[in-house]
Amino acid sequence: MSIDSPTLGGRLPGWPPFIRELDATLSVHSQYVLSGNLYDSFLAPPAQVGGPARLLPLRDLLWESLRSSGSSCMVVYDPVDGLQIHPEPGDEIGDEAARAAEQLLGKVKADEKPSLEALTRHLAAVARPQENVRAAFVIDSASRIARTPTDLEPAERDFFRFCAKLSRTARPVRVVGARPKPLYNPVMWLVERPGDLPPWLTNDNENIREITIPRPHLGDRQETARLLARAFGVSDAGADDAAAEACDAFAEQADGLTLQSMIEVTRLAKERNVSLADLPDAVRTYKLGVLDNPWSRGHLRRRVLEGEKKVPERVIGQPQAVTKTLDILKRAVLGLSGAQATRSGSRPRGVLFFAGPTGTGKTELAKAITELVFGDESAYLRFDMSEFSAEGSGDRLIGSPPGYVGHEAGGELTNAVRADPFRVILFDEIEKAHPRILDKFLQILEDGRLTDGRGNTVHFSEAILIFTSNLGMYVRGHDITARDDGPTGPAARVRNITPGMTYEEIEQRIKGSVADHFTEVLNRPELLNRFGDNIVVFDFIGGAAADKIFDLQFANICRRVTDEHRLILAVKGEALQTLRDWCTAELDKGGRGIGMALESHFVNPLARALFDRELVPDERVTVSAVRREGGIVHVDLQ
């Protein structure tokens, strides 16, 4: 681009909006605070008419825009590299920049690291030039100048006081060329966040303009993808339908990434001999930092098909819940979760909301899914949401914000997913979490990512999220018609579902209660919409299922006795039937209640009896009777 090119201020299309904003306001602002997406590459118009667009780092982008306005050089300072002249000498333009810098600053030693006092003289020389030389001064990594913006050292305070005064006393410069009108030689601060500078520097200072550089939108990513397609031998992706489709898919998968990250993804793909059509897989590898993808393993479909027989044997008495869960799991394996959305690739692989009576197998089904997909039921990550009832407890999930204790440690959830993105994450009893904490799930469910307290983005696109809830078991008395099974009234709670109801009625009532909780109580209908039809309702444990659960848990007890003490434990039929009747008499607490009853009515008295007995390996011990005496259960051994 030549120096006599048209100016950028609203008249040259194709430049990033923040550059057009900066260029258009050079006549009224002497300093700028740039924050946000500083370390990205940016789309710029072709260097020559008819050529391809360019991807430039921020320094080069700023220089190109300033040069078109007549600037001769750009002086850059950062606390690490010191002073540098941009562009570097070596060609006609670089040599001209060196001469202009020397005219303004005098002889500058390469990579000089001036003190803050000396830096003020350089800033004044550029912002208040003695001669009509148009230039700019960039203070890179300005967030690192002050130890803290609100508690300055004396030298730091004097430096920023000088810069505040300089913003008001800067002198506009006229030069011959494309923009002969007076323009300031801008001082540009590059900061991570606007608050990294002393607030009094920018507050009520109309001479300093704050500009936030956004992350690239879909259009930027699509254009970048077409540029990067050249690395795969595609010179014009727009003229090739297959290449254009691959580029659009690349751009969609790169949601949340910078353009520089897209460049790195392309390099990664070339190193691994990945084709243009398979770039989304390279995006996944770049985001997650892992090469192995359990979801792409060929045997996974076979394991899920086998699970149609194994899971019902493990989660007993819940045919509807198991079938719906496996359907959602099949959808996840095929990569079809959220397929109806325009952009679904970044959403979690699967989302499940388990609701229904306690002890009916919700946690057990989560473990079964984990073992089915990852081969190990302990691979699931569990959070008891009753521990997150306080508003500030959400910091445990994503980490404390900067400046707070524990900031460096990160969050339990974000750290775990960053370490292993392929996992099942269980959020138990979600209704007990503070409503503000639930807001964090909105971003996860919609975009599949979450930013932790340290500013790092964690991706959930390969995880299965399971939420469990006991909502719908009880409702307030005034919310339903009075029934005979309890008191009613504004403060009373009554049973909403009871054993004996049909599954269809239980499902309808629980889903209605879940909807009321999120819309009326929490005022979070958008979170309910994210769950969609993924609410899986569990039924009460019936008599036949209770017998199976009893047999399974009783067999576990006998096996434990054999493993621990090499005893052969047998129970006579009458004693076993007595135990069965006692343990399955009340099913309100589901399978967990059967287990607690077995522990109370059998394990405890058995342990008492065995403790008083000399145990001999391989001995056969028979329980001949189970009886109650004075409220205490005893077992008779033979």
Image (spheres, rainbow, N blue to C red):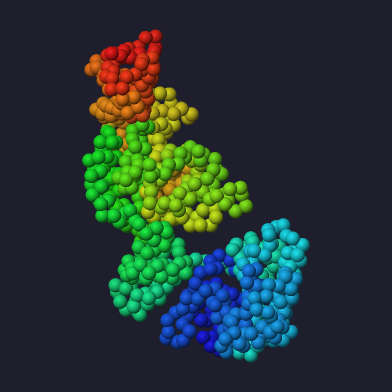
Q: Is residue 630 left or right of residue 333?
A: right
Q: What's the residue at 51%, 53% (across, down)?
A: 452
Q: Residue at x 51, y 57 (%)?
A: 456
| Residue 329 appears in the rendering | yes
How many numbered badges does the structure rendering display?
Answer: 0
Vertical position of residue 245 compared to residue 606: above or below: below
Where residue 444 appears, as percent x and y from the top left, is 44, 52
Left or right: 395, with 483 as reference point? right
Q: In the image, residue 254 lies at what x, y percent?
A: 41, 64
Q: Which is more toward the observer, 408 or 397?
A: 408
**Where 493 sits versus 282, above or below?**
above
Q: Residue furthest front?
A: 617
Seen at 48% across and 57% down, the residue is 457
Residue 440 location in percent, x, y? 48, 49
Which residue occupies 49% across, 46% down?
412
Residue 29 seen: no
Residue 513, quarter of the rendered image: top left
| Quarter of the rendering occupied by the C terminus | top left
Instruction: Classify 532 as above or below 65.
Output: above
Q: In the picture, residue 628 is in which quadrant?
A: top left
Percent position of residue 430, x then y: 44, 40
